[in-house]
């Protein structure tokens, strides 16, 4: 679609052949598809949210045709939680973050697969590359979703954002083998809402004129930042819909709900001034695992702790970051969450240093209860260039660093499993 006359107003786009129309269409008169998107302001909307449909499950179904017509759950064993579920499993009530035992009660015939993050990251990187061919203003939220700012791309690509997004959707299907749902609007809040409206393979639009009426009767939990606690408080005050917040005065909302009141009032009025940030600052690097059985066995827990520390170390090295603060996260058999941290003098990426600090924290808690989950993290992050500098005093620390860097060199050449420390066996 080439732009020749800016007085001609486009209102419809065919998602199959990308033809544009100046009148609203029920079907495309070029390819005869009924897959048409229409909106009176479609030319003027440039903030998009792209969300992969059941991402992990879709990748697994792509790679194994035997899974295609079966309910599929990606998660960590009977005592873990659901990372994602395919749409067949979702029709049975299975949801992300649901305990696995509940998911299996709802859908006992489901196939269960442990997540393969490296495979999912590879697909995510490919999708990110396709998005960045359209615009440099891509803000990833996770492996499977991102915001895009397509301002100025009409002049660059000679196509309106809606056409570029329709092309992107088709490219992802052809080149990655999965589908995405797209939301297009004039701000991030509404674009995110749009991408959830018509999953899977949806493409929904909300313009400025439509937004207030669309939000009017929607539940308050649709507002970004309204979690269970705030929802409960709002509901107890008789406020169940976004429209009810919109009808209040700003000072009244702030008086009742504090600083978050200003935020939800603006969203209720379809206002969101947040910009797309291509580089999201990483605040922490962590890894955790849920056990099949509750345990406080020291030997077992230290082995798991080491595995987690190696994973955190590898991720920090890949990201070019290290941290001063080592954190552990424990969930007890009665679901009590315990967080402990220790700050060291020098930022590190070294698994051995992370392990020794995390082990001290773990051993203080090990006799208090049995654990169902253990996690390790690095925070207070710094650039790799100032991590693990040579220590004139601590010779042992220097030795640990040299050993680990030598191991990394061997692993990078011959594979990660070629060389391991004894405690991982």
Image (cartoon, grey):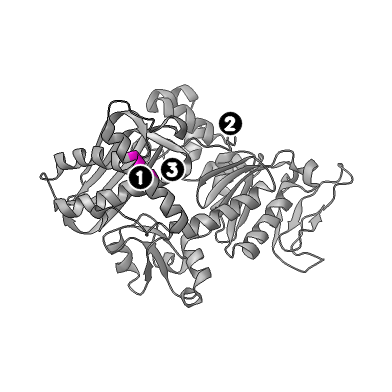
Q: Mark 2 near mark 1, Cβ–Cβ under 8 Å?
A: no
Badge 1 marks a residue whose secondary structure is helix
Quarter of the image holding residue 236? top left
Give residue 325's position: percent from left, percent from top: 32, 32
Viewer can see residue 222: no
Real-space Cα separation, disc 2 to disc 1, in angstroms: 46 Å
> Which residue in the protein does label 2 denote?
273
Badge 3 marks a residue whose secondary structure is helix
Work out whether 34 lies above or below 96.
Answer: below
Select label 1 or label 3 by which is in front: 1
Quarter of the image holding residue 424? bottom left
Give residue 357's position: percent from left, percent from top: 25, 37
On screen, residue 376 versus residue 243, left or right, reads left
Number of marks drawn: 3
Front in this rendered view, residue 141 or 264: 141
Residue sitting at x 64%, y 49%: 131
Real-space Cα separation, disc 3 to disc 2, in angstroms: 35 Å
Real-space Cα separation, disc 1 to disc 3, in angstroms: 12 Å
Give residue 281's position: percent from left, percent from top: 49, 35
Front in this rendered view, residue 410 or 236: 410
Badge 2 marks a residue whose secondary structure is loop
Q: Outermost residue toward the bottom?
A: 66
**Bounds of the magenta span?**
401-405
> Which residue in the protein does label 1 denote?
404
Viewer can see residue 207: yes
Select label 2 or label 1 by which is in front: 1
């Amino acid at each position: 679609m080439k732009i020749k006359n800016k007085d001609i107003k486009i209102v419809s786009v065919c998602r199959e052949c990308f033809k544009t129309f100046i009148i609203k269409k029920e079907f495309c008169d070029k390819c005869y598809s009924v897959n048409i998107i229409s909106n009176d302001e479609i030319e003027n909307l440039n903030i998009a949210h792209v969300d992969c449909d059941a991402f992990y499950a879709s990748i697994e179904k792509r790679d194994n045709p035997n899974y295609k017509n079966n309910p599929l759950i990606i998660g960590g064993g009977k005592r873990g939680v659901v990372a994602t579920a395919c749409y067949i499993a979702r029709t049975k009530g299975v949801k992300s973050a649901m305990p696995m035992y509940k998911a299996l009660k709802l859908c006992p015939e489901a196939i269960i697969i442990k997540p393969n993050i490296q495979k999912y990251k590879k697909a995510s990187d490919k999708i990110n590359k396709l998005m960045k061919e359209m615009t440099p203003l891509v803000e990833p939220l996770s492996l499977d979703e991102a915001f895009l700012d397509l301002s100025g791309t009409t002049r660059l690509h000679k196509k309106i954002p809606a056409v570029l997004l329709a092309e992107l959707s088709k490219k992802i299907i052809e080149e990655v083998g999965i589908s995405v749902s797209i939301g297009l609007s004039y701000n991030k809040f509404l674009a995110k809402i749009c991408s959830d409206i018509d999953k899977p393979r949806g493409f929904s639009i909300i313009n400025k004129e439509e937004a207030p009426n669309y939000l009017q009767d929607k539940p308050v939990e649709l507002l970004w930042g309204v979690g269970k606690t705030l929802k409960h408080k709002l509901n107890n005050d008789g406020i169940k819909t976004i429209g009810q917040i919109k009808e209040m005065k700003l000072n009244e909302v702030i008086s009742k709900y504090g600083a978050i009141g200003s935020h939800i009032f603006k969203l209720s009025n379809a206002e969101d001034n947040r910009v797309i940030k291509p580089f999201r600052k990483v605040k922490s690097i962590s890894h955790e695992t849920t056990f099949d059985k509750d345990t406080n066995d020291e030997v077992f827990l230290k082995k798991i702790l080491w595995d987690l520390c190696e994973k955190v170390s590898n991720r920090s090295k890949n990201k070019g970051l290290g941290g001063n603060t080592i954190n552990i996260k424990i969930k007890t058999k009665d679901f009590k969450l315990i967080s402990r941290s220790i700050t060291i003098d020098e930022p590190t990426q070294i698994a051995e240093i992370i392990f020794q600090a995390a082990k001290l924290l773990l051993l203080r808690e090990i006799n208090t209860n049995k654990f169902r989950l253990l996690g390790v993290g690095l925070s207070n992050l710094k650039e790799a260039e100032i991590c693990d500098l040579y220590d004139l005093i601590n010779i042992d620390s220097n030795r640990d660093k040299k050993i680990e860097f030598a191991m990394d060199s061997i692993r990078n050449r011959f594979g990660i499993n070629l060389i391991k420390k004894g405690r991982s066996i």
